[in-house]
């Protein structure tokens, strides 16, 4: 502590270098804090469970070819599902409009009264049947599954009027905060639908939607359109076999269909990877930038400190000759760096929050959490000390005889 | 003298290899990071239809009202069938076309071949003239086909290659979803990115559409949209005709308005139309309409993914840190040579000579950094696919312009960074240096 005053005096003679190092530390801190924060947000989003038995679920996109009346689609889909369920390795199968994380689907507002102006909660609508829960591996926490006699066909442009629905727990809690959702009516359009069951978790097709990540509703209707998704659950370890066998069996049974070559048959793991590809990439990019940035800042500190050590060899020699120990010299440089570092991080904290605030307004990002700033401060101060160690050790090895040399 | 200084500069690169190496690496990484992200940014934020983007407009009409509408108060981003019919028949603009995406199956004549899906648009004949679509063979279907609900079709070069072996197929017949269509024209490569006319469906960077068919016929055949369909509140009548009459928005609508007067006329026409709907009792609220040109529409639809902007920003910040770092290192490098400068100055070199020498030396460092940056940019562009969607990543590549820009940015940035250290070098007092020696 005794040394701080002379350090300040010396720093005043190296204003440019001091300012440059602290500015670099400040900028690095601002960028690293925000980058770490973005990484954390992306990773949280991509690691949320969908509620499905993800390892064993497969989606097959099917588009019918040729002229068909809507009434024909129902039996055609039923035939396909019966066929799929018989393939060895298949646990169960059903047909639907959409799956969690698939980024395309149907959303509606749910109301508690028929004439309500603003709906009570927004929900994703999944067309389903009595096989849906078993196929997806959803956990029923209250009520019951759909019965086979509740499943109805629905022409594609008809009004959504299911007699019964199954909702997720998040949605049930939003609609009925008292916890008793089963048996109560909700209104999708104009007719009441009775909640018969509550499942623990089922994500919506759109990860990160503001109105509720797992606010989903299953309805016992079979949408009659020329395109549908078959969802198949396989026995553990059989996914790859079924992935090859299922489309071949479907095409063998009826050629008048298209299963797209590109993404027509996808495992849920692939759907997840596709949906979060840019989030994962963003996290990787940020991580790489952070590492390189820290390395460059460390390199800058090493470079400038080495230069200072070279410049001050004579002064160091004089100090040593006057009785300073090696550890005094070492401490001098470490303390000097710490002072510059503290100056840098103070400025950096301000810049980090400023940058975040700007990104909040421009890119709708969340507010920076304090622990990222604290972690960044700690990392940069330690980095500075680590970077300065080598030149400082070299400085401490300057012999006292240096004082007598002219250069 | 220039050549001599450059030579001196290159030689001094080797003098403090560690310091120089650090500088080159810092510049290289900084430039590469910003160039790779800039390549992506440029690819996604370019003008999809330069020269005409300010004459093309898309209207929005508030048909949902304050209660059923969006919570943030924004207008619906597509139109209802009712409104499109009315705007089309009013015929106020120079050219006008409604569009919606359709996905139909293509049944090959060979019975053993599997069917395939073709993606296209249902639209009006004006579409092709309005968007300057280049034709390889034939032309758009005659506008009488729009009125007659005719079966003309315009196909892409790729589909023409696949179905007709690339020959002039005008007049030939193809079968989509069980219906026959007659080829009116074959489009040469045309795929504006971002696809502004279908931005509301999020297909901004998708591959080239396969075909275009008359809107009126698609409606007759009850072909559904393969894009979004947003209905807000209220009971929806059943069946196809009920859907057409509903307040569901699913149609894009574009008009060509050649000058400001035409834009003004169209604006007042839109407001008048909405006011009429209010008087007729369909809208229970005051008219609320908007008219956006291509760039405004792309902004409203947020077509440029936020990732590209954030990463461009982060990379620019990164470049700034690298430059601050370079200033520091150059300062160390130059000041180490204070004795040498003192000697040169004492021997009669002017300050401007010192400036020239050291700035050139910095340029040499920048050149080396740029070379490394080029290599890293190349890796970066290859790695772009990791960060951005495949459709977008495909757009970014190392073009000659990007190569030139990389080198230029590296050299200019380094010279700018060298200004302060050079000034310090030029301030060296020769007498003081000579005395201490």
Image (cartoon, grey):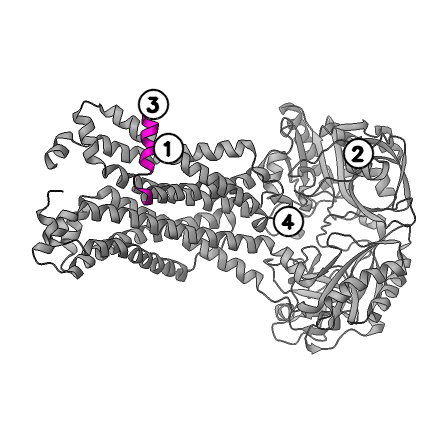
Which is more N-terminal, label 4 or label 3?
3
Badge 3 and badge 4 in a common chain: yes
Cα distance between the residues tagged 3 and 2? 64 Å
Foreground tag (4 vs 1): 1
Task: Tell which circle, 1 or 3, labels the residue nearer the N-terminal end.
Answer: 3
Are tags 2 and 4 found on a single chain?
A: yes
Dominant secondary structure, magenta:
helix
Return the residue nearer the eye: A212 or A339. Answer: A339
The chain holding disc 3 is: B
Within 10 Å of the Cα at label 2, are there few (<14), some (14-19), or many (20+) other Cα atoms?
many
- Residue in the picture at 14% in, 34% down: B433
In which quadrant of the rendered image does the C terminus of chain A lie? top left
Q: Are marks 3 and 2 in contact (CB under 8 Å)?
A: no
Q: Secondary structure at mark 3?
A: helix
Side (left or right) of B296 relative to A106:
left
Disc with the residue nearer the chain's start (1 vs 2): 2
Tag 4: Cα neighbours inside 10 Å, few (<14), some, or many (≥20)?
A: some
Label 4: chain letter = B
Mark 2 — residue? Answer: B124
- Of circles 3 and 4, which is in front? 3
Stretch in magenta: B3-18
């Amino acid at each position: 502590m005794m040394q701080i005053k002379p350090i300040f005096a010396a720093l005043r003679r190296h204003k440019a270098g001091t300012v440059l190092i602290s500015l670099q530390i400040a900028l690095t801190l601002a960028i690293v804090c925000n980058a770490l924060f973005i990484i954390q947000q992306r990773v949280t989003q991509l690691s949320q469970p969908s509620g499905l038995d993800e390892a064993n679920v497969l989606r097959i996109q099917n588009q019918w070819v040729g002229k068909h009346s809507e009434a024909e689609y129902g039996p055609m889909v039923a035939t396909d599902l019966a066929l799929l369920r018989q393939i060895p390795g298949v646990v169960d199968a059903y047909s639907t409009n959409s799956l969690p994380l698939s980024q395309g689907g149907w959303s509606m507002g749910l109301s508690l009264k028929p004439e309500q102006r603003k709906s009570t909660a927004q929900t994703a609508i999944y067309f389903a049947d009595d096989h849906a829960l078993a196929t997806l591996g959803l956990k029923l926490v209250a009520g019951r599954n759909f019965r086979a006699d509740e499943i109805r066909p629905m022409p594609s442009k008809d009004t959504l009027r299911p007699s019964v629905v199954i909702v997720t727990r998040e949605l049930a809690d939003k609609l009925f905060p008292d916890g008793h959702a089963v048996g109560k009516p909700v209104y999708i359009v104009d007719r009441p639908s009775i909640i018969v069951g509550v499942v623990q978790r089922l994500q919506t097709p759109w990860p990160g939607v503001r109105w509720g990540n797992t606010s989903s509703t299953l309805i016992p209707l079979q949408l009659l359109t020329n395109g549908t998704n078959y969802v198949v659950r396989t026995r553990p370890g059989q996914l790859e076999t079924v992935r090859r066998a299922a489309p071949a069996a479907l095409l063998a049974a009826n050629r008048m269909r298209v299963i797209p070559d590109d993404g027509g048959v996808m495992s849920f793991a692939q759907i997840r990877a596709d949906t979060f590809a840019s989030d994962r990439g963003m996290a990787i990019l940020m991580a790489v930038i952070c590492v390189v940035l820290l390395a460059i800042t460390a390199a800058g500190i090493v470079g400038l400190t080495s230069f200072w050590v070279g410049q001050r060899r004579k002064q160091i020699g004089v100090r040593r000759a006057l009785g300073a120990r090696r550890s005094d010299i070492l401490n001098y440089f470490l303390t000097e760096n710490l002072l510059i570092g503290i100056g840098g991080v103070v400025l950096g904290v301000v810049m980090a929050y400023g940058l975040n605030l700007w990104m909040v307004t421009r890119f709708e990002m969340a507010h920076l959490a304090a622990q990222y700033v604290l972690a960044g401060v700690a990392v940069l101060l330690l980095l500075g000390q680590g970077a300065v160690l080598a030149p400082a050790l070299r400085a401490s090895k300057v012999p006292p005889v240096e004082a007598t040399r002219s250069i | 003298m220039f050549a001599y200084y450059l030579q001196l500069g290159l030689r001094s690169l080797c003098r403090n290899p560690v310091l120089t190496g650090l500088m080159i690496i810092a510049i290289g990484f900084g430039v590469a990071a910003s160039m790779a992200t800039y390549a992506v940014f440029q690819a996604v934020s370019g003008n999809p239809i330069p020269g005409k983007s300010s004459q093309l407009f898309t209207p929005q009409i508030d048909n949902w009202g304050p209660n059923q509408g969006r919570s943030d108060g924004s207008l619906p981003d597509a139109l209802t069938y009712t409104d499109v019919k009315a705007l089309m028949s009013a015929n106020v603009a120079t050219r006008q076309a409604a569009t919606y995406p359709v996905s139909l199956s293509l049944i090959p004549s060979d019975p053993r071949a599997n069917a395939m899906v073709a993606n296209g648009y249902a639209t009006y004949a004006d579409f092709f003239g309005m968007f300057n679509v280049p034709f390889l063979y034939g032309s758009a279907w005659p506008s009488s086909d729009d009125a007659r609900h005719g079966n003309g079709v315009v196909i892409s070069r790729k589909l023409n290659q696949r179905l007709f072996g690339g020959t002039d197929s005008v007049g030939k017949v193809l079968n989509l979803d069980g219906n026959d269509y007659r080829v009116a024209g074959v489009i040469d490569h045309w795929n504006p990115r971002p696809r502004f006319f279908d931005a509301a469906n999020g297909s901004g960077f998708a591959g080239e559409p396969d075909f275009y068919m008359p809107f009126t016929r698609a409606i007759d055949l009850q072909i559904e949209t393969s894009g979004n369909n947003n209905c807000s509140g209220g009971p929806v009548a059943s069946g196809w005709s009920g859907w057409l009459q509903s307040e569901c928005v699913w149609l894009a609508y574009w008009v060509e308005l050649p000058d400001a007067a035409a834009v003004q006329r169209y604006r007042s026409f839109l407001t008048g139309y909405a006011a009429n709907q209010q008087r007729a009792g369909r809208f229970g609220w005051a008219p609320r309409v908007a008219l956006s040109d291509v760039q405004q529409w792309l902004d409203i639809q947020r077509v440029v993914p936020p990732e590209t902007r954030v990463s461009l920003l982060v990379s620019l910040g990164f470049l700034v840190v690298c430059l601050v770092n370079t200033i520091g290192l150059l300062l160390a490098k130059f000041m180490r040579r204070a004795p040498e400068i003192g000697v040169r100055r004492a021997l009669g070199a002017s300050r401007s000579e010192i400036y020239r020498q050291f700035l050139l030396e910095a340029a040499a460092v920048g050149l080396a950094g740029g070379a490394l940056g080029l290599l890293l940019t190349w890796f970066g562009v290859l790695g772009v696919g990791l960060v951005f969607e495949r459709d977008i990543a495909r757009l970014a590549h190392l073009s000659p312009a990007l190569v030139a820009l990389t080198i230029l940015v590296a050299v200019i940035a380094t010279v700018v960074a060298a200004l302060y250290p050079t000034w310090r070098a030029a301030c060296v007092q020769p007498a003081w240096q000579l005395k201490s020696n």
